[in-house]
Image: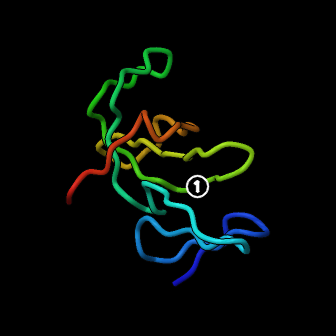
């Protein structure tokens, strides 16, 4: 399954491969990856290690990821744009 991220970007279902019309770049996260924060985000009351899901990836104007964090009942507690350095993939 392919996901369209931007008019010139298509991300394959394999992690780490973005197909640009001019070549390839590597991205660390794919859509729907389970990720964990690498740092606290106090303003959102999120702590390092909290898990969320990547729901969107951006390559332009800068690389970034929309990540949704939920409580135990599945209610969204935060939806943030984060950089790759703020996240790590969680093996499920």
| Nearer to the camera, 82 or 27 | 27
Q: Which colour scheme is used?
A: rainbow
| Residue under the image location 34 percent in, 54 percent down | 34
Residue 48, given in percent of the width and then of the height, sits at 30, 27
Task: Look at the numbered disc 1 and give the secondary structure of its residue.
Answer: strand
| Nearer to the camera, 80 or 30 | 30
Q: Residue furthest top?
A: 42
Q: How many marks?
A: 1
Q: Residue furthest bottom?
A: 1
Residue 78, given in percent of the width and then of the height, sits at 50, 35
Q: Is residue 42 left or right of residue 79?
A: left
| Residue under the image location 33 percent in, 31 percent down | 38
Residue 21, given in percent of the width and then of the height, sits at 73, 74
| Residue under the image location 44 percent in, 64 percent down | 16
Q: Residue furthest front?
A: 23
Against 52, is 34 above or below? Answer: below
Quarter of the figure that contains the C terminus? bottom left
Q: Mark 1 points at which residue?
A: 57
Residue 8, given in percent of the width and then of the height, sits at 76, 69
Against 10, is 88 above or below? Answer: above
Against 90, is 10 above or below? Answer: below
Q: Is residue 29 left or right of residue 55?
A: left
Against 61, is 8 above or below? Answer: below
Q: Label 1: few (<14), some or many (≥20) within 10 Å?
A: many
Q: Residue furthest right?
A: 7
Q: In this view, does 55 lie to the left or right of 19?
A: left
| Residue under the image location 67 percent in, 70 percent down | 20
């Amino acid at each position: 399954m392919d996901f369209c991220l931007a008019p010139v970007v298509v991300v394959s279902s394999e992690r780490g491969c973005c197909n640009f019309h001019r070549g390839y770049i590597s991205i660390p996260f794919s859509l729907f990856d389970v990720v964990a924060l690498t740092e606290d985000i106090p303003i959102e009351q999120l702590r390092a290690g909290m898990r969320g899901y990547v729901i969107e990836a951006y390559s332009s104007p800068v690389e970034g990821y929309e990540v949704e964090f939920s409580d135990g009942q599945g209610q969204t507690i935060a939806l943030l744009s984060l950089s790759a350095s703020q996240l790590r993939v969680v093996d499920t």
